């Protein structure tokens, strides 16, 4: 297991290009089995979630090849509609395969998340929507068994704008008989990418990015070559790194409107933000001010995937902040690790009360989840002295080559095999 060794206190200067978005790439992998023709996804980031998705597709019988950063998936020989418990455990987003397996085989079997001991991850919204499309669903021995004679377009209303449920509905309805109208859809930019990818395959999807999406079922989909959008969460992580460390950091490839809620908060902290086309430059000098309140919300609200990094920033700012986590109730698990670095944070349920301290100090901490792990790296970069961030397996799920990109900005960070 690798670790990062970080000497904190260096200012960051320079420019970094965001990789393709993890949350765009994963559902596009799932969508690749909707056609028997090869599809190529360009510039797939070297993250373990993408490798795991490739494993799932191979398990189904598809041929998946990585070449120069691109991935070509040929699922002509895919024959299985079942995903093993082991792979479901590796990658929670394997639930996104339900929709595409139903379209391809009219059957799908995945391990129930609860059955694999990976914590609470309700999928009721996914399953209820699939039922509306004509799918019969049974649960047996920890597996969800889905089947249908055919998929039929329907009117679907989501009670909550779940990203995964919205994507599953798109995947299950692109070849359904008739028209599907989805109200209450999630509006995340990555859903627009899935729509664009499906339309590049010959689908008729409109409205992604708004809360109403219509899908006209088509008979056949074909292969395509597709370049996903860049990762707004990775870009946001680098901007927050710049804010914590001080200096000037430019991120390229991400549209400012896709992270406007973060940019608003960074300005509130006292950072200067300059936007030009797809370049966002942050200037951070002197001690920043705490945000009074950060509350995570579905897009375009503040992303839960940047909550931990923003909390780490606030720990070093002047004043106090209230951070409210509305999406995932267990998303403050990184806080005890931040406390080892001297952070003053109190968690009560979905609320974290932060009192900023002038400086964090180096410590040995464990990255227990992807974004919490990123927050610990950022805290260590801004801290006084040496830190170790242990267990990089979660960080590797969503950040490709994090240490090289940070090093290029002037950080003192080494990846070390333990
Ligand atoms: C996706 C993102 C993840 C991000 C999250 C919220 C991917 C691969 N992952 O996850 O990085 O943090 O969106 O922006 O795109 N819920 C239910 N029932 C359901 C489905 C969801 O109650 O059937 C709840 C969840 O428990 C959670 C909330 O809805 O509280 C949001 O979940 P959802 O939008 O579905 O997140 P994911 O698609 O899993």
Image (spheres, rainbow, N blue to C red):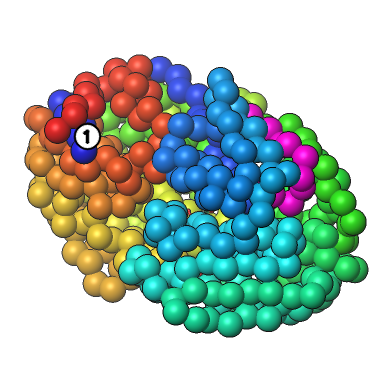
Q: Secondary structure at mark 1?
A: strand
Q: Nearer the viewer, residue 186 or 367?
A: 367
Report the front residue among 309 and 202: 202
In the rendered image, residue 342, in percent from the top left (x then y), is placed at 10, 48
Q: Is residue 64 magenta?
A: no
Which residue shows up at 25% across the image and 52% down it?
368
The image quadrant where one finds the C terminus is top left
Q: Is residue 156 visible?
A: no
| Quadrant position of the N terminus in the picture | top left
- Whether residue 46 sits left or right of residue 337 in the image: it is right
Task: From the viewer's side, name the closer residue of 79 and 335.
Answer: 79
Residue drawn at x 74%, y 51% as measured from the top left = 34
Q: Which residue is mark 1?
A: 2
Image position of 171 with respect to 140: above or below: above
Residue 66 picture location, percent across and down = 55, 29
Local packing at callout 1 (Cα closer than 10 Å; few below 14, some 14-19, many 20+) is: few
Task: Give how far across and how far down residue 336 sits, in percent.
Answer: 16, 57
């Amino acid at each position: 297991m690798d670790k990062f060794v970080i000497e904190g206190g260096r200012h960051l200067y320079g420019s970094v290009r965001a990789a393709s978005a993890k949350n765009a790439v994963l559902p596009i992998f799932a969508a690749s089995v909707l056609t028997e023709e090869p599809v190529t996804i360009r510039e797939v980031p070297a993250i373990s979630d993408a490798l795991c998705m490739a494993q799932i597709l191979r398990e189904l019988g598809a041929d998946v090849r990585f070449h120069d950063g691109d991935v070509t998936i040929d699922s002509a020989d895919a024959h299985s509609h079942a995903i093993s418990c082991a792979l479901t455990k590796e990658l929670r987003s394997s639930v996104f395969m339900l929709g595409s397996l139903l379209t391809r085989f009219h059957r799908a079997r995945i391990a129930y998340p609860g059955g694999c001991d990976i914590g609470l991850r309700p999928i009721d919204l996914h399953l209820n929507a699939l039922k509306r499309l004509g799918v019969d669903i049974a649960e047996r021995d920890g597996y969800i068994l889905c089947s249908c004679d055919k998929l039929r377009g329907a009117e679907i209303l989501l009670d909550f704008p779940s990203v995964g449920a919205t994507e599953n509905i798109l995947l299950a309805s692109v070849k359904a008989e008739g028209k599907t109208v989805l109200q209450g859809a999630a509006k995340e930019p990555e859903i627009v990418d899935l729509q664009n990818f499906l339309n590049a395959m010959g689908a008729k999807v409109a409205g992604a990015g708004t809360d109403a999406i219509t899908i006209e079922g088509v008979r056949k989909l074909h292969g395509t070559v597709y370049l996903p959008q860049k990762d707004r969460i990775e870009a946001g992580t680098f901007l927050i790194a710049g804010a914590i460390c001080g200096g000037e950091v430019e991120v390229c490839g991400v549209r400012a409107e896709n992270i406007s809620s973060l940019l608003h908060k960074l300005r509130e902290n006292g950072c200067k933000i300059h936007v030009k086309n797809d370049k966002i430059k942050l200037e951070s000098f002197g001690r920043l001010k705490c945000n009074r309140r950060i509350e995570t919300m579905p897009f375009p609200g503040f992303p839960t995937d940047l909550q931990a990094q923003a909390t780490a920033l606030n720990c070093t700012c002047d004043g106090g902040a209230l951070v409210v986590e509305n999406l995932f109730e267990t998303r403050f698990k990184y806080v005890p690790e931040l406390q080892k670095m001297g952070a003053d944070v109190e968690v009560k349920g979905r609320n974290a009360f932060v009192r900023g301290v002038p400086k964090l100090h180096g410590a040995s901490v464990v990255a227990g989840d992807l974004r919490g792990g990123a927050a610990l790296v950022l805290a260590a970069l801004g801290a006084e002295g040496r830190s170790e961030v242990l267990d990089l397996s979660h960080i590797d799920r969503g950040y490709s080559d994090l240490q090289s990109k940070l090093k290029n900005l002037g950080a003192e960070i080494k990846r070390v095999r333990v």
